[in-house]
């Protein structure tokens, strides 16, 4: 079975982990950076800072942007203090199909905790997860997901949550690629991160995923420190342990939904400046790219288009590709990108190599 067929077969399962439903309830997951995160520190030849990219319009757009942004005296010059680059994570920096990592973690936790909760075998929504009933899971409501997340995340101290998440990420492997989830990072994007930083840009993750979840591994995986991660946030409650030690306990209450227009709003809230370059891959990133794509100085908006069914997955529905409800890239978004002259990256045509563990073409 090729990956296009695999993506189509996961449509129902992907639907139940829709971004809105998941992020309304998830309190952020911690995938420990359990592999050699030094990949992002690789140095590349000065004549080709993006060696995993094929020559083409997308690669040239990035090179041209950096050249314009760093040319002193030009009306497109971007001062060092304003060199802000923002990146979505899921589907932009690493694989998001067929399920977001947060959904996989929650499902695995329910199964791990099930021996202590025999009632789950007969009670919804846990029964569907324990019986691998994908059709039932596809119809989960937001309230169902709140129950699942509450059972696996809420009520834990931040430290306990980090420990559990780290143990999971040290062993959890994506069944399709047979690699750790933290290894499914796009090599071409690691090169972009390094290239921008080499030219004075501060790189930020701006994701619909849980902020605490991403902060737990972002520095090791991407070279991005925790303070440069903006994500969906959930409340924590300050209290004291039995011995009087101060604690923060995770609460299943949404604080900031960092998706769609929330991305631009939270960039303004946490950074206070409009990014000069922004990368995304779905309709949830549209407003962030619009926000970056303005002003007289150099600016660039970039969309990653998943059209490589052989090496990864192919989904849209732009261009007639399957609509799997995870990382939706609509035709309307594609049309806006063309109208606004955003760079659209074809994974199939523009990327010579997808992963560090993949042999180059």
Image (cartoon, helix red, strand yellow):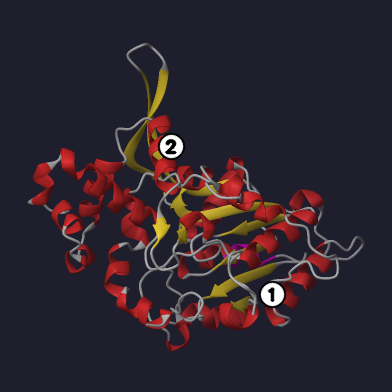
State the image coordinates of residue 223 (x, y, percent, origin top left): 65, 49
User: Could you tell me if residue 225 is visible in this image?
Assistant: yes
User: Could you tell me if residue 258 is visible in this image?
Assistant: no
Q: What secondary structure do most residues of the magenta stretch adopt?
A: helix
Say which mark, if any, is on residue 5: none
Q: Is residue 304 left or right of residue 131?
A: right
- Viewport quadrant of the C terminus: bottom right
- Residue 200 vs 117, above or below: the answer is below
Based on the picture, tell me whether residue 291 belongs to the magenta stretch. yes
Q: Is residue 320 left or right of residue 279?
A: left
Neighbourhood count class around disc 1 (C-alpha, 10 Å): few under 14, some 14–19, many 20 upward: many
Which sits in the foreground, 88 or 332? Answer: 88
- Residue 206 vs 329, above or below: the answer is above
Q: Is residue 43 left or right of residue 353?
A: right
Say which mark, if any, is on residue 162: 2
State the image coordinates of residue 305 (x, y, percent, origin top left): 53, 77
Neighbourhood count class around disc 2 (C-alpha, 10 Å): few under 14, some 14–19, many 20 upward: some
Based on the picture, tell me whether residue 262 belongs to the magenta stretch. no
Q: Quadrant of residue 131?
A: bottom left
Q: Residue at left 31%, top 58%?
A: 21
- Residue at numbered disc 1: 53
Q: Is residue 9 left or right of residue 39?
A: left
- Viewport quadrant of the N terminus: bottom left
SS class, disc 2: helix
Q: Quadrant of residue 320?
A: bottom left
Separation of marks 1 and 2 at Cα, in angstroms: 35 Å
Q: Which of the two discs, 1 and 2, labels the residue nearer the N terminus?
A: 1
Q: Residue at left 50%, top 66%?
A: 91
Q: Are marks 1 and 2 in contact (CB under 8 Å)?
A: no
Q: Residue at left 47%, top 87%?
A: 319
SS class, disc 1: loop
Extreme-right residue of the structure: 73
């Amino acid at each position: 079975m090729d990956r296009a067929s695999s993506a189509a077969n996961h449509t129902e399962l992907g639907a139940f982990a829709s971004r809105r439903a998941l992020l309304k309830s998830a309190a952020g997951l911690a995938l420990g950076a359990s592999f050699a995160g030094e990949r992002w520190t690789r140095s590349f030849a000065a004549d080709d800072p993006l060696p995993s990219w094929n020559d083409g319009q997308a690669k040239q757009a990035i090179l041209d942007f950096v050249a314009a942004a760093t040319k002193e005296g030009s009306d497109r010059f971007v001062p060092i203090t304003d060199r802000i680059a923002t990146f979505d994570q899921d589907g932009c920096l690493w694989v998001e199909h067929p399920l977001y990592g947060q959904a996989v973690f929650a499902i695995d936790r329910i199964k791990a905790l099930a021996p202590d909760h025999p009632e789950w075998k007969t009670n919804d929504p846990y029964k569907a997860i324990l019986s691998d009933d994908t059709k039932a899971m596809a119809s989960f409501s937001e309230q169902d997901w709140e129950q699942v997340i509450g059972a696996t995340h809420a009520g834990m101290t931040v430290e306990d949550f980090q420990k559990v998440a780290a143990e999971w990420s040290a062993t959890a492997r994506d069944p399709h690629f047979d690699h750790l989830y933290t290894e499914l990072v796009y090599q071409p994007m690691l090169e972009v991160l390094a290239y921008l930083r080499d030219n004075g840009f501060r790189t930020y993750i701006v994701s619909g995923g849980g902020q605490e979840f991403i902060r737990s591994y972002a520095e090791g995986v991407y070279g991005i420190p925790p303070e440069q991660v903006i994500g969906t946030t959930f409340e924590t409650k300050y209290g004291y342990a039995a011995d009087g030690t101060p604690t923060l306990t995770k609460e299943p209450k949404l604080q900031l939904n960092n998706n769609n227009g929330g991305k631009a709003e939270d960039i303004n809230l946490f950074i206070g400046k409009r990014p000069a370059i922004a990368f995304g891959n779905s309709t949830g990133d549209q407003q962030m790219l619009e926000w970056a794509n303005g002003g007289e100085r150099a600016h660039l908006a970039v969309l990653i288009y998943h059209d490589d069914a052989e090496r990864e997955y192919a989904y849209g529905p732009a261009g007639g590709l399957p609509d799997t409800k995870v990382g939706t890239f609509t035709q309307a978004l594609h049309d806006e990108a063309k109208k606004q002259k955003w760079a659209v990256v074809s994974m199939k045509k523009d990327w010579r190599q997808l992963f560090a563990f993949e042999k180059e073409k």
